[in-house]
Structure formats: C-alpha cells, structure tokens
Amino acid sequence: MKKLFLSLFLIVFAYSDVLNIENFEADLYSKDSQNSIKKITVSLRVSGRDINDNEAYVFDGLNVVIGSFYVEDLLTSMGKEKFKETFAKYTAKKHSVDIDEVLIISLKILREPKLEEILQIIREQGNYLTKNKDKGKNDEDDIIIKKDGKIELKPLDLNSIKNFGKDFGE
C-alpha cells in the first residue's frame, strides 16, 4: 500500500513544474482612509502542470487576483489562504492553467514616505543651503517671470565667479 501511494505521489509531482516569482510589486487599496493606496512586494513559489509554458497567464492571474484584495486582508492568515485559493481558481477558470500549490515566500508592505516627511527634509536642506549661501545676494534677482507665466532663471555669468576655472589649469 505504501509503495502504491509513494509511486502515485512521485508520478503526480513528476509532471508538475515550479515557477518562482520574486519581488512581484503591486499597488493595493488600503482600508486606511488617509493613505488609500499602499505598495506591496510578494515572492511566491507556484507549482502545477505546464506552469513554465504558461508563465504569462500565471502573471496575469496574479496581477488580477492580488489587485482584488485589501492590504490588511493579505496580512492575515485567513486572507493569505483566501488569496492562494482564489489565485488557483482564477487561473484555472480564465486561462486553463492548473495550479497545484501556491507558497508565499515573503509578503512585505513597502513604506513610502509621507508628504510631511518629504517637506521636512526639503525644509532642512533649505536651511542648510541658506546658511552656506552668500548673505548679500537675493534669490529674487536671479528669477525671471515671463508674460506667459513661465518662471526661468537668469543666465549665470561665469566670469563674475572668483577663481572660476582655476582648478582646471586656466
């Protein structure tokens, strides 16, 4: 009995392919109202019959199915199991690709900086630049506003810069 089961098990896995999907990125909706879209990265190992021949269909199914989940749902164990089940059923129904097993190797939420953090960094760099800048010079003198609303900088006279080009042997 054991030999029969073992031989049947080996025959089934002899005809299956394995496809490793590394660092697949997707934008998913979040239930959090203030930041409604979050970026995730997922690595999967998909096994089934003729998976490598139908790789494009597997990626299409993954893209469609993963986009139908909320980020918070994918972080729970029940959500992960539902994702695996839905992914296998969708690819079987839509593309006739039989997926035997889906293993989630990693699932990460990529943290994107918030607008306030970006503005704070810009302010800090602006303070640094104003400390190192000549005190007598105005920024407004360098800006030209044209009639059509375009803002341009005045051309810089390189001859007015003391010791310009001296480091190149001139």
Image (spheres, helix red, strand yellow):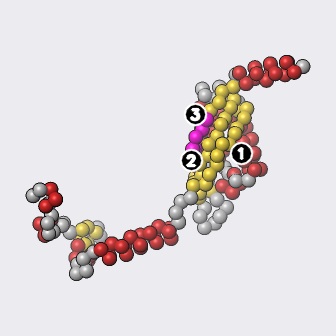
In the image, is residue 143 above or below residue 164? Answer: below
Which of the two discs, 3 and 1, labels the residue nearer the N terminus? 3
- Mark 3 belongs to which amino acid? Ala
Q: Residue 47 carries which label?
A: none
Residue corresponding to mark 2: 25
Residue at image coords 85%, 18%: 3
Q: Quadrant of residue 91?
A: top right
- Mark 2 belongs to which amino acid? Glu
Residue corresponding to mark 1: 83
Magenta highlight on residue 141: no
Instruction: From the top left corner, tell me how far across and down residue 78 is, in percent.
Output: 77, 50
Query: CA–CA distance between discs 3 and 1?
Result: 19 Å
Q: Residue 56 carries which label?
A: 3
Res 57 visible: no
Q: Residue at the left extreme? A: 170
Q: Nearer the viewer, mark 3 or mark 2?
A: 2
- Mark 1 belongs to which amino acid? Phe
Q: Main secondary structure of the magenta part?
A: strand
Instruction: Classify mark 2: residues with Cα within 10 Å, few (<14), some (14-19) or many (20+).
Output: some
Q: In which quarter of the image is residue 95?
A: top right
SS type, badge 2: strand
